[in-house]
Image (cartoon, helix red, strand yellow):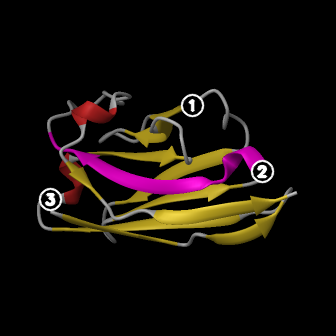
Amino acid sequence: VQLQASGGGLVQAGGSLRLSCVASGRTFSRAAMGWFRQAPGKERELVAVIGRGGSAYYGDSVKGRFTISRDNAKRTVLLQMNSLRPEDTAVYYCAADYNAILSHTPQNPDDYEYWGQGTQVTVSS
């Protein structure tokens, strides 16, 4: 499985970005998909996850600002990020968990078998 993330960049506080992650390899619809981020000197943090059935879970710091969605036909998971803050600055990674059951939204990064290369998001104040 290969995951290709894109859409990062530099944006002012209050602005928006949309991240995209395209998967190849195994059947995309069988995977729970997650977005994680890691800032310098910090641990990898859950941003959002969408289960195989479409249920979503968000980290507390992004609730109400970020939206995760998936398009199985396009093998794509999206992360719409609004009202961005400087503390959202990080490298964002998409990940796939092919062991998740239909209703599960895995939140532990150790549950994910496949990871993309990351895309940098920088929010200026």
Residue at figure coordinates x 66%, y 53% from the top left: 89
Q: Which mark is residue 86?
A: 2
Looking at the image, do the residues carrying marks 3 and 1 touch, with CB atoms under 8 Å apart? no
Residue at figure coordinates x 67%, y 32% from the top left: 61
Q: Position of residue 53 (x, y in %)?
A: 33, 39
3 or 1: tag closer to the N-terminus: 3
Which mark is in front, 3 or 1? 1
Give the quadrant of the C terminus: bottom right
Cα distance in 3D space between marks 2 and 3: 36 Å
Q: Amino acid at mark 1?
A: Gly
2 or 3: tag closer to the N-terminus: 3
Q: Amino acid at mark 2?
A: Pro
Residue stretch in magenta: 86-98
Vertically, is 47 above or below 75?
above
Q: Position of residue 4 (x, y in %)?
A: 34, 71
Give the quadrant of the N terminus: bottom left
Residue at figure coordinates x 16%, y 43% from the top left: 98
Q: Secondary structure at mark 2?
A: helix
Looking at the image, do the residues carrying marks 2 and 1 touch, with CB atoms under 8 Å apart? no
The residue lying toward the viewer, choosing from 82 and 51, is 82
Pointer 3: what residue? 27
Q: Secondary structure at mark 3?
A: loop
Which mark is in front, 2 or 1? 2
Q: Amino acid at mark 3?
A: Thr
Instruction: Count numbered badges in the picture.
Output: 3
Tell me if 42 is positioned left or right of 76 in this view: right
Q: In the rendered image, which quarter is residue 10 located in?
A: bottom right
